[in-house]
């Protein structure tokens, strides 16, 4: 799986969490993302860190993030997400 494929999957999960509960749109990397994506933490953590460093996610606490306004814009449609993270 390519880096951009993983990043698209991650952002989709954060977008779904935001849409489902705008008051508490946070996902914990070690728990929620591992369960939802079926991937190991060690495989996801570098990509979550990259997304945070590039302002797609906002940091809340250790391994807890939410989608940022930039992340929301890039996940408005699947076409937007693919344009932002092409294969």
Image (cartoon, rainbow, N blue to C red):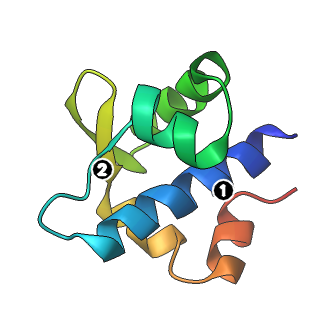
Using the image, tell me which numbered label, if any, was put on residue 53. Answer: none
Reading the chain from its start, which is encountered first: label 2 or label 1? 1
- CA distance for labels 2 and 1: 15 Å
Q: Quadrant of residue 6?
A: top right
Crowdedness near tag 1: few (<14), some (14–19) or many (≥20) residues, C-alpha within 10 Å: some
Q: Position of residue 27 (x, y in %)?
A: 34, 45
Residue labelled with disc 1:
8
- Residue in the picture at 16% in, 58% down: 24
Quarter of the image with the C terminus is: bottom right
Quarter of the image with the N terminus is: top right
On screen, residue 26 above or below 53: below
Q: Quadrant of residue 22?
A: bottom left
Left or right of 52, for residue 21? left
Q: Position of residue 23 (x, y in %)?
A: 11, 65
- Residue in the picture at 33% in, 26% down: 63
Crowdedness near tag 2: few (<14), some (14–19) or many (≥20) residues, C-alpha within 10 Å: many
- In this rendered view, identify the residue nearer to me: 84 or 44: 44
Q: Quadrant of residue 72?
A: bottom left
Residue labelled with disc 2:
66
- Residue in the picture at 30% in, 50% down: 66
Q: Position of residue 49 (x, y in %)?
A: 47, 27
- Callout 2: SS: strand
């Amino acid at each position: 799986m390519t880096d951009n494929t993983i990043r698209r999957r991650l952002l989709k999960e954060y977008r779904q969490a935001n849409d489902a509960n705008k008051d508490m749109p946070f996902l914990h990397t070690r728990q929620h993302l591992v369960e939802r994506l079926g991937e190991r933490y060690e495989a996801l953590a570098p990509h979550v860190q990259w997304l945070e460093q590039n302002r797609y996610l906002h940091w809340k606490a250790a391994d807890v993030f939410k989608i940022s306004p930039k992340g929301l814009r890039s996940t408005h449609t699947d076409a937007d997400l693919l344009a932002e993270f092409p294969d």
